[in-house]
Amino acid sequence: MDESNIKTVMDKGNYTFDMLFNDIQADSTDGIEIPESVYMSNREYKSKLIVVQMLLCLADLYKAENYNSNEKLRNAIEIKVDGDEQLSGYMFFVSQNPQFNYSWNYMRKCRTNYIEFLVNSIRFLNNVLVDINLLTGKSWPGNNIHVVFHDILDVELTSEVPFVKSRLLWENFYRLAMVKSDYNIVVKIKNNLLKTSNRKAPSDMKNLIDSVFDMINNESKKNTEYETV
C-alpha cells in the first residue's frame, strides 16, 4: 500500500465491536421509518437487536487471537452454554409441550446446533471486524462506497472519523443463522456493483481492497482526462 494512503492508528484508531453495535443501534433509531414487512412487530425487532448484541459481545469475549483453533473455541462455547441456567430452564419449559411428547430430545439436538451457530457467528464477526479495519487503512476517494458482508452488514466508507459507518440489513437477518468463517463480499459505489469476492483469509480482503482501489483511481483518472480534452 502507498504510504500516503495509510491512516495511522492515531488518525483512525480501531473500529471495535462497541462501535459496530452503536452504528447498528443508531441506524435503527435515527428517524427512518421501519417497514412493517421487515419488522413484523416492534417486539420482534427488539429481540433481534438483543441477539445481535449478544453475538457481538461473544465475538469480543472470544477474540480470534485467543481462540484461534476451532476446537478451543467450541469447547469454550460448550462450557458457557452448559452453564447457562436460564437457557436450561427455557429448554425444560419448551420441552413440556405435547407436540414434543414431553421429551428433551428435540431440545438437546437444537442445543448442539446452537453451539455450532455461536461458534460460526463468532468466527464470522471476528473476521468481519478484521476486514473493516483493513478497509479503514486506505484513504478512499469520495463517499458512497459500500462493502456488504454476506448480505448482512453494509459498511459505508466515509471521509470523516471514524471513516466507516455500518448498517445491518434487517431484511436479511435470517442469514445470521447460516454464517461461516468464509463469506461473500460485495463492493458498490451507490448502487453500482464494482466487484465481488469470496473471503477465506485476510489476504483475500487485502487483494480485494487493492483491486477496488485501483479500479476507482483508474476511473477517476479517465474522467479527469475526459474533462481536460
Image (spheres, rainbow, N blue to C red):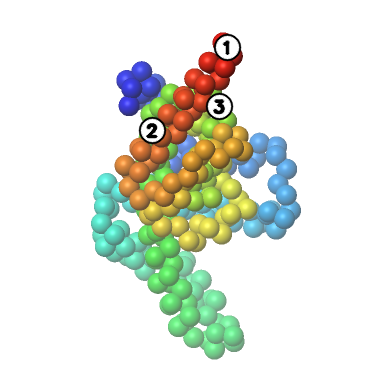
Specify whether residue 3 is in view.
yes
Residue 126 rendering spot, x and y as whole percentages: 38, 47
Q: CA distance from mark 3 to mark 2?
A: 17 Å
In terms of image quadrants, where is residue 69? Answer: bottom left
Eyeballing the image, is 15 above or below 121? above
In terms of image quadrants, where is residue 192? Answer: top right
Q: At label 1, which amino acid type do we have?
A: Val
Q: Quadrant of the N terminus?
A: top left
The answer to whether the residues at label 3 and label 2 have Cβ atoms under 8 Å apart is no
* Res. 210 mark: 2
Q: Name which residue lies at 73% across and 43% down.
A: 33
Q: Which residue is mark 1?
A: 229
- Tell me which numbered mark, 3 or 2, is placed earlier along the sequence: 3
As drawn, is 117 to the left or to the right of 31? Answer: left
Q: Residue furthest front?
A: 229
Specify whether residue 160 is in view.
no
- Tell me which numbered mark, 1 or 3, is placed earlier along the sequence: 3
Front residue (pair 63, 225): 225
Eyeballing the image, is 170 above or below 192? below
Q: CA distance from mark 2 to mark 1?
A: 29 Å
Residue 63 rendering spot, x and y as whole percentages: 32, 48
